[in-house]
Amino acid sequence: DAGVTQSPTHLIKTRGQQVTLRCSPKSGHDTVSWYQQALGQGPQFIFQYYEEEERQRGNFPDRFSGHQFPNYSSELNVNALLLGDSALYLCASSSKTSGETQYFGPGTRLLVL
Amino acid sequence: AQRVTQPEKLLSVFKGAPVELKCNYSYSGSPELFWYVQYSRQRLQLLLRHISRESIKGFTADLNKGETSFHLKKPFAQEEDSAMYYCAPLIQGAQKLVFGQGTRLTINP
């Protein structure tokens, strides 16, 4: 099991553009959570997907949206990018069988110019 | 509001010395508490979870509900313990982790 995988590893965009980040959960996990980690800060919860629906959401604007597919993989979309969206985006997967412990992917580093 | 405080941004100790990384949280319920670690150029990984009461890599953490603290301890630090450490309660119901700003631990030889 490769664990949680994310793509791409790095991305450079310009202000106003849109971006899609992808995540494949650990085998056997059905829940995907997304976090934003700004430089020098701890990760901040964006939202969580379970059974293809957004189950919980943090304090992020509607420009941040997501999707979960039937195979439990997930996408994070950010529209109208701002310079402040530059960060490491982390995906974490979990399940009831993992006791809801969240396992993290390597992250996608997004730079907005 | 749920908040996690890790008062030391940087902590430096000598190899073989005891180490304690502090974590205080404010949360009205009974959270599940975690410590995550990030070694250089590696992903964030689970170090320990208080409910399992395991000792991982020699680290332990005791939940003090009265003080709302979950400090991480190790009696004898090793050089390979140098990393970034994050305390994170899991907010029940919301199933989201709330991270502190992290403590960068450096073990000097």
Image (cartoon, grey):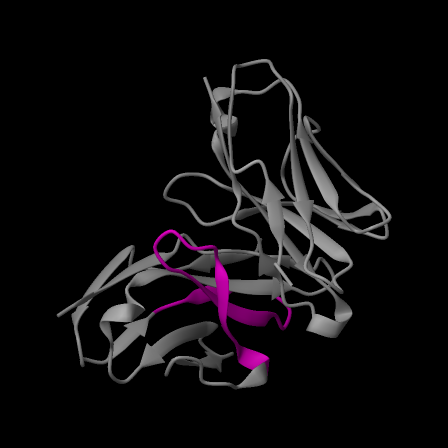
- Range of residues picked out in magenta: B22-51
| Residue A85 x %, y % | 52, 28
Vertical placement of residue A42 versus B65, above or below:
above
| Residue A64 x %, y % | 67, 31
Q: Is residue A107 left or right of residue B100?
A: right
Is A15 contained in the magenta span? no
**Residue at 61% from the left image edge and 15% from the top image edge:** A17
Q: Is residue A41 left or right of residue A13?
A: left
Q: Tell me, yes or no, if residue B51 can be seen here.
A: yes
Quadrant where the C terminus of chain A lies?
Answer: top left
| Residue B79 x %, y % | 23, 70
Vertical placement of residue A81 versus A46, above or below:
above
Q: Is residue B49 left or right of residue A39?
A: right
Vertical placement of residue A19 versus A92, above or below:
above
Asked whether B99 or A19 is in front, the reply is: A19
Question: Hey, which quadrant is residue B42 in on the image?
Answer: bottom left
Is B25 contained in the magenta span? yes
**Residue at 38% from the left image edge and 56% from the top image edge:** B102
**Residue at 40% from the left image edge and 52% from the top image edge:** B101
Q: Tell me, yes or no, if residue B27 can be seen here.
A: no
| Residue A110 x %, y % | 50, 31
Question: Hey, which quadrant is residue B5 in on the image?
Answer: bottom left
Quadrant where the N terminus of chain A lies?
Answer: bottom right
